[in-house]
Image (tube, helix red, strand yellow):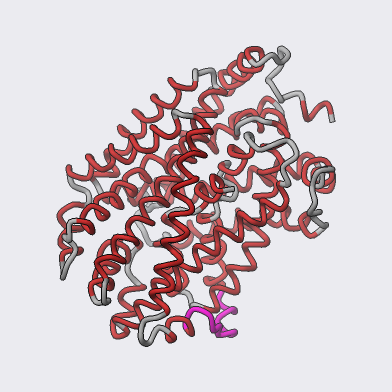
Amino acid sequence: MLAMLGMAVGTGNIWRFPRIAASNGGGSFLVAWVVFLMVWSVPLILAEFALGKRLRSGTVGTFASMMGERFAWMGAWIAWVAAAIGFYYAVVMGWTLRYFLAAITMQLQGEGSAELWERFSFSPAALIFHALALAMAVTVVLRGIRGIEAVVRILMPALLVLVVVLAIRAVTLPGASRGLEFLFEPNWSDLLDVNIWLQALTQNAWDTGAGWGLVLTYAVFSRRREDTNLNSFLLAFGNNSVSLLAGIMVLCTVFSLMPEAAGEIVGASNEGLTFVWIPQLFNAMPGGAFFMILFFSALVFAAWTSLVAMFQLVGLALQEAGLKRRRAIISLAVAAFVFGVPSALWQPFWLNQDSVWSVALMLCGFFFAVIVIRYGVKRFRADFINSGEQDMRVGAWWDWAIRLIVVQALALVIWMCWSVRNEPLWGPLGVGNMFVQWLVVAAILIALNGVFLRGLRKRAVNRGGGPGTGSAGFASRQ
């Protein structure tokens, strides 16, 4: 569970949630956010947990099993999206490392945070920390699931303690109650705003890890008698609890120390909030230098454990394609550095990749819902989710929730395309740019479908299975 929480809790919880919650009505946003926790995140996490535990395959093998051999490319698509996000996410982790170092060496006093961001971000110096972030992630993943468990046993408790300490410090500041009121008192009329609901759905999709294939990848290593239903709820609510603590931490601090600038702070970009404003807020707090170190420690831990999970997912997919584990992980690390260089040096490219592949995540959730619907929703719940060893039984609400995910995913893609309608069609945030990248990647993966199948068959034989694609015969045997 610590490994799972490490996968789910990332920078999106700590730097994105407070900004999105504050920019969308605070308490009103929380209502919609909790709703989508139950109708997006939990249903997908239950499905991924059940698939990983039963099939013991990565994303490629799972889709070959459940959808048929022609659809192995869908699992490769999910792995590619995780890889593409990992390429620029390693850049983000590099930023957290640089600011952690700056916090320790007292370089963030006064206006130093803004000056450092201006000087450091998207400069050659960022490449050094990009490489360091990749080295830290690869070192863990190369040691296998034991290595991941060993690291998260330290990092996740430390991260949770840091976030709790920072939240407690924030609520004890003079005037912090205004931040709590803003975050927890809904204006019910705001719930008529469709944008709030779409933002709440987007936040759930991005910060819980549901639909990414990450839960499935870690569930491959769960015990046969693991209560995955209970774990699914623990993971979803545990992840969102960290987001809520981060919101309390940031908003209480803002309303206490800089209420006159609250609108400007919460309206800043993720990077602006975290790397420019947060240090200035801590500088205005008694003992702020110490708490600033704690904050950037938490951010490093969150980014590190999430990047490890992405590499684990992609590494398993490359193994299923026929590569040896060590070669797969090292090849991935080299690719991540090379393809991450443009994001590290050029802000428009970073924004482009963040936009293109974040939206593609919605299709990943769509694909997982299609697996369930193709198998039969009620039958899937009986065969995969409510198996004999589960203490917690999942009811029929899950059946309509998993069907609803298809609608939600398509609605999100349409809304995201509509939200950038005024951008140049072929610009960094343009719809044309996005769809061309999607089509090119999809065409390549479909063309390589046979390669994936040969890799699966070879892997199955090496593991003592039959001549088929490992677990690919499972669906037909049911």
Task: Measuring from the top left, give residue 202's x and y in whole percent.
Answer: 53, 60
| Residue 37 on the magenta span | no
Name the residue located 58 percent from the left edge and 44 percent from the top edge: 364
Residue range in magenta is 182-193
Where residue 428 appears, as percent x and y from the top left, is: 33, 50
Q: Is residue 191 magenta?
A: yes
Left or right: 445 in relation to 468: left
Q: Above or below — where is 256 with respect to 414? A: below
Up/down of 250 relative to 311, above or below: below
383 with respect to 217 (left or right): right
Q: Quadrant of the C terminus?
A: top right
Foreground residue among 200 and 240: 240
Image point (42%, 67%), residue name: 165
Residue located 43% across and 20% down the image:
327
**Quarter of the rendering containing residue 270:** bottom left
What main secondary structure does the magenta stretch of the protein show? Answer: helix
Q: Number of marks in the image?
A: 0
177 in relation to 432, above or below: below
As drawn, is 325 to the left or to the right of 406? left
Percent of width and height locating residue 116: 17, 58
Camera-nearest residue between 104 and 115: 104
- Residue 381: x %, y % from top left: 80, 47
From the viewer's perspective, is 7 left or right of 172? right
Q: Residue at x 24, y 77 (%)?
A: 284
60, 112: nearer the viewer:
112
